[in-house]
Every structure is written in C-alpha cells, then in structure tokens.
Image (cartoon, rainbow, N blue to C red):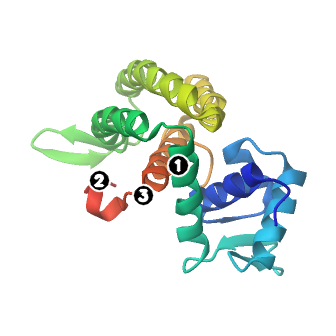
Amino acid sequence: MADSADDRLLALLGLRLKGFAAAAGVGEVVGLNEDATAAALDALVADGLVNYNEARDVYLLNPATGRPEGERILGAQLDAAGARSAVQAVYDEFLGLNMSMLKLCTDWQIRADGDGKTLNDHSDEDYDQDVIGRLVDLDDDLRKILTKLRGLLERYGAYVPRFRGALDRLLSGEIEYFTKPIIPSYHTVWFELHEDLLATLGIDRASEGSI
C-alpha cells in the first residue's frame, strides 16, 4: 500500500499525465514531494499497477491495471466530495476555452501568408506579441476555471503555479514556453489539465472529439 490514499491517487494521476517519468517528475505535476511520490510509486509497483524501468530510472503506468484503477479512485474521490456535477459543469466551460487554445497554438506555429500558410519563424515580433496577448486574455478566463476547480478538489491548486510559471517565462522572452513539448510549456500544462479532467470524469479523449 502507498503511504496514504491521497498519495496513491496523486501518484497514479501524475504518472498518467506524464506518460513515464522519474519520481520527481511525477510529483511535480501533482504537487507531491519527491519522497512521498517515490514511496507511493514503489508501493504501486508492488501492487502491479505501475511498472519500473530500472535502466532508465522511470516509472510507467500499467495500462491494463493502473489506468482503470486510477480512474476508479479519481471517480471515488469525486463522488465522495459530491462534486461530480460541478466538475462536469467546469469541464464544459473548459471545452469552450480549449477551442480557443487550439486556435492560438495553430496561430503561434503557422501564419497566414497571402493565400497560403507558412511556418511561423518568430521573426515578426509584432505578430508574436499579438498571439501572446491573446493567450494572456485566455489565461484570465482559465484562472477563473481553476479557482472553481480547486474549490471543489484541492489538488487542482497545483496547476496554478505551473500555468503562471509557463506564462511568466513566455512573457520574459522564452518563446519555447508557449507550445514546446517535453518542457512544462503552457500548452503542456494545458494538455495535462485536460487529461486530468478526462480521467476524473471517466471520459475517453477519442470519443470526446478533441485533441
């Protein structure tokens, strides 16, 4: 068993969001310290819910056992808090913002060029600043959603500093913090929040129709 039910839940969720990672990386996305994360993950390995790759020092969610168990305990937490309908309503709000985020990411990566389109090489500062400004506006709306979510389930508070950190780095000129994968860019954290909501509500991303 993990040190606590909460650590077990957070470790399974963090690993689902990361795909594979060392204990520190798993804990970072859910606000759990490294020692507690490692203890929870090792217990989950013993339970057959998580696999450990010793050569790479990374943990991987067992798709046959860990994924459904993660969804089960997320759903149980949601129902115990009496928050299912409220989280569903916030998720519906998020989907509206998600379409805007997808458009922003497309505009950041591809520019309209006459009758066609071209990759954005980020040489036009005015263009980039316009897209970033739209992201700042979207971030204002996202913060309202996060405030609602963390009022329902405390664990959603972990997303607030992660979005703020990505946006601050982007505004300081580190343009990779808009959409670059692997690093905790704004889009990476957005994708993880989306996956968190899907896992919590037991919704399959493919059936949802978004990306």
Amino acid type indicated by mark 1: Glu
- Which mark, by number, is residue 192? 1
**Badge 1: how crowded within 10 Å, few (<14), some, or many (20+)?**
many
Which residue position holds label 3? 202
Q: Position of residue 95 (x, y in %)?
A: 31, 39
| Quarter of the image that includes the N terminus | bottom right
Sequence-wise first label, 3 or 1: 1
Can you tell which quarter of the image residue 26 is in?
A: bottom right
**Image coords of residue 55 (percent x, y):** 82, 81
Q: CA distance from mark 2 to mark 1?
A: 14 Å
Q: Amino acid at mark 3?
A: Gly
Please say if the residues under marks 2 and 1 sit with CB atoms less than 8 Å apart: no
| SS of the residue under disc 1 | helix
Q: Nearer the viewer, mark 3 or mark 2?
A: 3
Eyeballing the image, is 122 above or below 133?
A: below
Q: Residue at x 86, y 56 (%)?
A: 3
| Res. 210 mark | 2
Q: Tell me: residue 205, above or below residue 123.
A: below
Q: Quadrant of residue 137?
A: top left
